[in-house]
Image (cartoon, coloured by chain):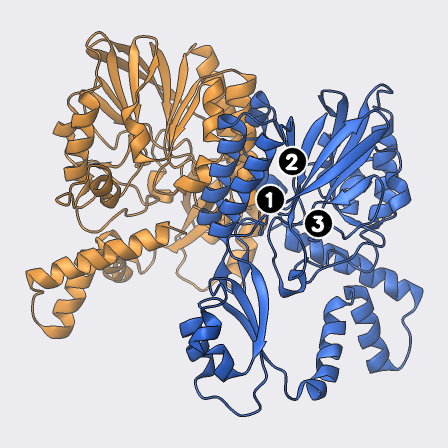
Chain colours: A orange, B blue
Amino acid sequence: MRFLHTADWHIGKKLHGYDLLEEQADAFQQILTIAKNEEVEVIVIAGDLYDRSVPSVEAIDVFNRMIVEMNLQEKFPVLAISGNHDSSTRLETGGPWFVQSDFHLNTRLDQAFEPVEMGNTQFFLLPYFEPISARLYFDNEEIRTIEQAMKEVISAMEKRFKPDRAHVLVSHFFVAGSEKSDSETKLMVGGLDTVPLSLLEPFDYVALGHLHGKNALQAENARYSGSPLKFSLSEMNQKKGVWIVDTEVDKSTVKFKEITPLRDVLQIEGSFKELMAQDFYESIDRENYLHIQLTDRAVIPNMMNQLRQIYPRVIGVERLFGREERQKKNETKKEIKTLAPTELVNQFFSEVTGEEMTQQQEVWIKDNLEALHQAERGK
Amino acid sequence: MRFLHTADWHIGKKLHGYDLLEEQADAFQQILTIAKNEEVEVIVIAGDLYDRSVPSVEAIDVFNRMIVEMNLQEKFPVLAISGNHDSSTRLETGGPWFVQSDFHLNTRLDQAFEPVEMGNTQFFLLPYFEPISARLYFDNEEIRTIEQAMKEVISAMEKRFKPDRAHVLVSHFFVAGSEKSDSETKLMVGGLDTVPLSLLEPFDYVALGHLHGKNALQAENARYSGSPLKFSLSEMNQKKGVWIVDTEVDKSTVKFKEITPLRDVLQIEGSFKELMAQDFYESIDRENYLHIQLTDRAVIPNMMNQLRQIYPRVIGVERLFGREERQKKNETKKEIKTLAPTELVNQFFSEVTGEEMTQQQEVWIKDNLEALHQAERGK
């Protein structure tokens, strides 16, 4: 059977303060067109439908229109899960009614073990969850990490496998060895959120959400769809789109269909004078989201205002001169951004005390960071 | 046909800091039992389902369970509207799917003119709206007040009347001459939110929400159901419950079915010594929400903590001694609370300038207060 795999819509997300709802509505229309042209039987959305647990009314309005059009008007069956950005309880509203028109939206771990059967395929819809949920669901105090939890989860799913069907997992987590972009939230305390690829072996296809690049994971049977739009400068050179997946028993084949953004995220480079020259700026699409690299050395008065007169969507200005001096500083900054919270605390502890943390101290930090994280998500 | 009329559930409301979700779930179960015993064909909820435009996840979870049980499990058709406390966009989620199982939840003015027909009755579900919505919907710049808007709204509804049916309006506003309680939000700038009873004459029954007392309006064909629970001390002596309504063409008859609260809101009076005496406190239900009137004159150290040891849900302590001195001060305070915002600005203007506002100034104030109010609600 043929389905479309997308994820990480992040409806309501802003890019350096710019509202992306128009771009998101446009990308959605392209996804619908692809679904129709490719004659897919199902649309799969692997989590992070919204960007925030409490979306704005504008975001809700846009998302509500999308699901009405997709499921009630265009009659596509939809299989979706909540991601780490969604509030599972808020998203759950309407769920028990959605199934009447084959819109399956799973937000709780306990829903993941009842596969949705469509054509030759069993779909297991596993929403984002924290280890604590698996600990409670399986009544197993040993479960402390997502890896431990996933072993139990997948083993429970395998018991439901029908041998004459293809088996698809829809899920939202970080698979070991995947490549991150800047727009993804660092999910969890050090390593606790990582799933080894080998665990996913039982499935003919794993439709992943969470990472925003379609090539984040290089695997036979598991793929991130990536986000439909670029959400950061680091995604500048990525192609965005959706996977069209054909499943047979014990096999899946895929192809990628590209989405052309309403406004792209790009980088331009030049001197202030060059960038402000009519010949230049009329030669490019100024409506795009632009990161500007300036080659000038001199101070330019009122620079930002002047640039914004010509380029309405500047997402950043970088001075290339003096770059090397700043490089080191930036690297430290960047490093901090990419460190897991436990590692950060570790470094801080060593700097202040001159000692390493004991194992007990590390456990205490992990438990508390996890609790904090959950309190945050509970909002 | 027979239906149950309730309103103002305010799921998630707190009473002096105490969470009422348990009481609300209990009251809901009683409503369901009444609906079953009375064999009603429809349950009508006239707005303010939630207490806040952005309800907590706990409130959403409780409400989601209620509507699943009521509509999907017990199979009651449900006719509901959003009230001034609800966010219409947030509440709208799922609406297009709900109708598949006869759960009609109207949140926008434009939905009000398509009646839902059940048995011998046409139900017009009119959500709470601001005059600006009617101004846009009817493309009529003259509409500045709810009264003006309601004239147009009801006239448009009458065009849809089938003569051989009973006609019921479900709505959420303040009808002129009704009696308020302390737990209702003062809706709008002075008088702009008031609908004269005479406008409602075309309907055989008007199922109202907004005011929390079932006797707030004394009229033949229009009633507030009141809230299912007491939400303030001023409702101490009110009976809470639901109306069972029987409609015939050109006629309706009603009876009231009471709800017994899981924990009541009551007042007790006595000296500190009397109230702390075992004989006394074991003679009453200490689990209730209690407002305490103390007759002592002396200072009582650590009073509140001691009282709470015995009475776990104290919602206020009042000293009867020195009452008269405080009375005047309180009256001024209370007066300010009950004044409409325009009147408050008027008084302030007079006090500061020694002059009355001109008509133009009054219009300006009204327009701006209205705009502020709408910005508030847009959240």
Which kind of residue does numbered mark 2 sit on? Ala
The chain letter under disc 2 is B
Kind of element beneath mark 2: strand
Tell me residue B117's x, y (percent).
72, 22
Q: Which mark is residue A346?
A: none
Which kind of residue does numbered mark 3 sit on? His
| Looking at the image, residue B347 lies above or below residue B341 | below
Q: Which residue is mark 1?
A: B49
Kind of element beneath mark 3: loop
Between residue A25 and residue A52, name the one nearer to us: A52
Residue A360 quadrant: bottom left
Kindly identify the residue that appears in the image at 7 percent across and 66 percent down: A356
Q: Would you say the residues marked 1 and 2 are in contact, meaning their CB atoms lie under 8 Å apart?
A: yes
What quarter of the picture does the N terminus of chain A occupy? top left
Q: Which residue is mark 3?
A: B210
Q: Which mark is residue B80?
A: 2
Residue B124 quadrant: top right
Between residue A296 and residue B313, name the one nearer to us: B313
Q: Is residue A210 left or right of residue A104?
A: left
